Image: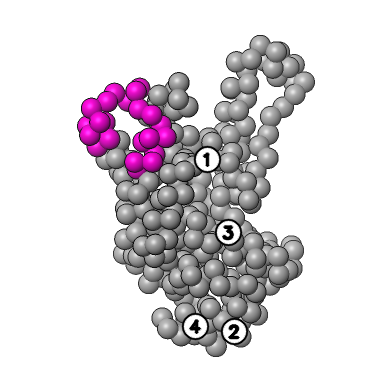
Amino acid sequence: MIYTSAKDWLGASHKRVLFYGMSGLGKTHLSNMLRDHGDWFHYSIDYRIGTRYMGELIADNAKAHAMKVPFLRELFLTDSIYIGSNITFNNLAPVSTYLGKPGDPAKGGMPIDEYRRRQEQFRRAEIAALNDTGYFIERAQTLYGYPNFICDTGGSICEWVDGNDPDDPLLRELASQCLLVRIEGSETHTQELIRRFDRAPKPMAYQSQFLDAAWGEYLSENNISPDDIDPNAFIRWTYARALAHRKPRYEAMAPWGITVSADQVAAVTSSEDFDAMIAAALDAA
């Protein structure tokens, strides 16, 4: 770890942290709060994915749908209009919409092979965005003059690393640049996330082996063909399984940094509170 004690952390002139954990536990809320404090640069992995690594894919997908409308097709062919995604730190819908859901096209789904292709595009994009962390640390300091840095990761980071491998290349790179901070939720948090997802199911990224197993199990359990699957029903069924799949993967990453609870994060209302929480976790590690 780049900070090994509360003294190291509190005395550091440049603080660098990376937040990870299940989506919905406060990573982006905490990042926004620190950014608003004024001296923290907020590097959003999902924003980087949507603007740098998948922006053209997202725009082309929207354009392909628009080209099916004769009126819009003529305007596109004459370069009279263009399409772009209005992605922001707090509106990442263009990325999730592009990822989509597998199943019946009449219900908003897509063929499983196309779904797998987009999942692989996202995997490569997220790894690339995570590897850009060092570049943005330097950029934040030299170009913008920010002394402190936050890397705000997506919930799927644990799918692409092996915390049990001391030579995992991505974890070694990230741990050399930032203090890795795991935000851990309780069983109560998990159940609330499941309830929230059930109310408004959203596309998410899966490790390919997990997706293939879940897809096969769902087909068998429901005795249904791929084209007849209700996309929302499938991702609702998959969500709790995905959280259970990710839990040990997050736990394996924990020794690479420190862990704080979602309840502790929720209680942070200032940069001073944040410093105190990190300092206490370092001394407890």
Q: Residue at x 58, y 34 (%)?
A: 58
Label at residue 280: 4
Give SS at disc 4: helix
Q: Earlier in the sequence, mark 2 or mark 1?
A: 2
Q: Residue at x 39, y 69 (%)?
A: 254
Mark 2 Cα within 10 Å, few/some/many (few <14, many 20+)? some
Identify residue type, mark 4.
Ala
Give SS at disc 1: helix
Q: Earlier in the sequence, mark 1 or mark 4?
A: 1
**Pointers 1 and 4 in contact (C-beta within 8 Å):** no
Q: Which residue is mark 1?
A: 96
Q: Earlier in the sequence, mark 2 or mark 3?
A: 2
Magenta residues?
217-238
Disc 3/disc 4 C-alpha distance (Å) = 21 Å
Which of discs 2 and 1 lies nearer the camera? The answer is 1
Identify residue type, mark 3.
Thr
Mark 1 Cα within 10 Å, few/some/many (few <14, many 20+)? some
Q: Which residue is mark 2?
A: 10
Q: Earlier in the sequence, mark 3 or mark 1?
A: 3
Q: Quadrant of the C terminus?
A: bottom left
Mark 4 Cα within 10 Å, few/some/many (few <14, many 20+)? some
Identify residue type, mark 1.
Ser
